[in-house]
Image (spheres, rainbow, N blue to C red):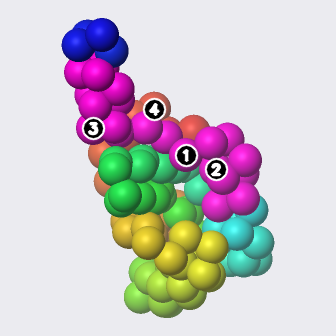
């Protein structure tokens, strides 16, 4: 009995990913912009009442990183309509900055 209570309290504290259909929805919103070439390292996390959505968005190399950042802001605004309580941590990358991506191996 005591074990069960501790266990359920513990599960609440544990971070968990959003369901797959949410990930797909997020990905389709991120990649619907024609300037977006790819999105990787998408991570969703819910922790208690908080949600975190983060990932790398890869843009065409001809796009400068300032413009890319503006598109990221628009994407985050779109996503915040769907996930009003979520915090977004998207990083803009172009194929020029891709080599600086700290995550390896790089899928795209
Ligand atoms: Zn990356």
Q: In the rendered structure, which segment of residues is drawn in magenta?
A: 5-27
Name the mark nearer the viewer: 2 or 4: 2
In which image quadrant can residue 32 be found? bottom right
Q: Is residue 97 left or right of residue 41?
A: left
Which residue is painted at 70% across and 69% down in the image?
Answer: 29
* Of callouts 3 and 4, the N-terminal one: 3
From this view, report whether residue 53 is shown above or below residue 81: above
Which residue is painted at 65% across and 68% down in the image?
Answer: 30
Which residue is painted at 36% across and 59% down in the image?
Answer: 50
The quadrant of the rendering that contains the N terminus is top left
Name the mark nearer the viewer: 2 or 3: 3
In which image quadrant can residue 59 be found? bottom right
Name the mark nearer the viewer: 1 or 2: 1
For the residues bearing labels 1 and 4, Cβ distance under 8 angstroms? no
* Of callouts 1 and 4, the N-terminal one: 1
Q: In this view, does 5 lie to the left or right of 24?
A: left
* Of callouts 1 and 2, the N-terminal one: 1
- Secondary structure beneath dot 2 equals helix
* Of callouts 1 and 3, the N-terminal one: 3
Whole-percent x and y of residue 95? 52, 61
In the picture of the structure, the residue carrying the numbered disc 3 is 13
Whole-percent x and y of residue 21? 72, 47
In the picture of the structure, the residue carrying the numbered disc 2 is 23
Which of 82/100 is in front? 82
Q: Main secondary structure of the magenta part?
A: helix
| Disc 3 residue crowd, few under 14, some 14–19, many 20+, Cα 10 Å | few
| Disc 2 residue crowd, few under 14, some 14–19, many 20+, Cα 10 Å | some
Does 26 lie within the magenta span?
yes
Spatial separation of the CA atoms under disc 2 and disc 3: 21 Å
Residue 105 circle label: 4
Judge whether residue 41 can be spotted in this image: no
Residue 18 circle label: 1
């Amino acid at each position: 009995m005591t074990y069960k209570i501790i266990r359920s309290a513990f599960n609440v504290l544990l971070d968990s990913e959003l369901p797959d259909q949410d990930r797909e929805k997020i990905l389709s919103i991120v990649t619907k912009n024609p300037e977006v070439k790819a999105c990787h390292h998408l991570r969703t996390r819910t922790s208690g009442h908080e949600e975190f959505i983060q990932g790398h968005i890869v843009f065409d190399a001809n796009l400068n990183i300032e413009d890319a950042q503006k598109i990221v802001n628009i994407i985050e605004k779109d996503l915040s309509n769907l996930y009003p309580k979520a915090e977004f941590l998207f990083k803009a990358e172009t194929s020029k900055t891709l080599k600086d991506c700290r995550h390896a191996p790089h899928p795209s």
